[in-house]
Image: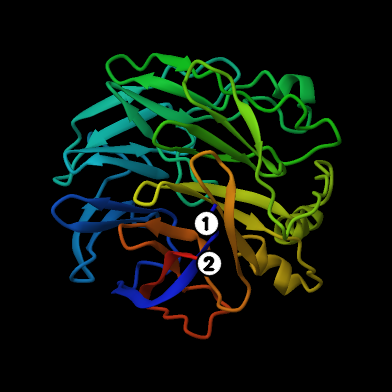
Amino acid sequence: MVSKELVKSSKSLIIPIDSLTVNRSTQLVHYQDSKDWLFNLNMSTNEIQMYDLKDKSLHKRLKFPVEGNNGVGRIFSFHIYNLDSIFLFQQFSTDIYLTDTSQSIKNKITVQVPEMHTPPFVHSTYFSSPVVVIADALVVKTRPADDYKEITNDVLSKRHLTYSINLNDGETELLNHKYPNDYLEEGYKLFDFSFAKGKDRWVYSFHSDHNLYYSDSMQEGLTAALSKSKYINGFQNFDVFGSREQHYKYYASAANYKSILYDKFRNVYYRFCYPEIEVSSEEDIMKYRFIPKLFSILILDTDLSIIGETLFDKDKFLSDNAFITEEGLYLSKNHPDNPELKENYLSFALFELADID
């Protein structure tokens, strides 16, 4: 087996932004047709910005009203099936809007949410969970609708992770992919997760579990595959009744796994890993609870065997502002600790997958 690593290329990507756009995106989506596009969600203006990657310029703004006859609510996330079919999601809403690059609303789908589960939770930055389109259905991430302070291991193990939505009538069907049987067995842990659909495989990564879980179909249950970072040993339990300050410190310092991404160009998976760090000052806690000080990326083949791990401990990157192209993996350079931070740009470094000699 050939070992791999992510090597920083000399190539970078720098795109100017306007004064109303922040340089840390709430959602980035790469889309390729005859051109390379990068879509960026600006939540404050309720618009999706369409950037031409070749010209490194803003091509178009897709701006949507929140209310009124053509209102779509506050956009929390979106999915681009193609430029004529763009799905818009709100954070807690059962409504999905279908639009295109002309910004016309073509359809509204009202989701018949399964009992004890939540409306779709679609995102590409926070525990990445992009939509999967299969025929006339969308497969989306869901969460338990239980009170998180009271949920037990037995209850959690019965909750599903994803369901399909029929685009014609909004009816749903739960995939047979559920939480691990023992996830809360040794104490309470955050149970958020990321999922990625590979070529033939559904793969799930949980916040506090060294295993990945996979299935080769929507009907079969999940199988565990050990995918441990060498930089993470154990996990802290989360005190659901702790103070806000204790929770913030946990978010900033506790070891965890977040997004898993599938690289269709190289047929590998990237698992984003966050080793435990020491934080003491309130300033560090407030900074690192959302922006990691340290992370690594596990590289896994199609069988979910580890073929490499790259630690990002010197240069400062935003691990949740990542996207994949034919060239490689792009990571945002707009970490507040990065001396190369460019306030008025979306700025990315390119990492190429290379063999280790």
Instruction: Identify which residue is drawn at 32% across, 57% down.
Output: 325
Q: Amino acid at mark 1?
A: Val
Q: Return the disc, 2 or 1, that comes first in the chain's sequence.
A: 1
Asked if residue 239 is positioned above or below residue 95 in the image, the reply reads below
Q: Amino acid at mark 2?
A: Ile
Whole-percent x, y for residue 339 in the image: 52, 85
Q: Are marks 2 and 1 in contact (CB under 8 Å)?
A: yes
Q: Nearer the viewer, residue 65 or 237?
A: 237
Q: Is residue 97 in view?
A: yes
> Which residue is identified by label 2?
356
Q: Which residue in the structure is indicated by mark 1? A: 2
Image position, residue 250 (x, y; %): 76, 55
Residue 247 at x, y = what percent?
Answer: 76, 52
Residue at the bottom extreme, as displayed: 339
Q: Of helix, strand and loop, which one carries label 2?
A: loop
Q: Which label sits on residue 275?
A: none
- The structure residue drawn at horizontal position 19% and vertical position 68%, both measured from the top left corner, is 54
Against 287, residue 210 (above or below) is: above
Residue under the image location 18 percent in, 41 percent down: 100
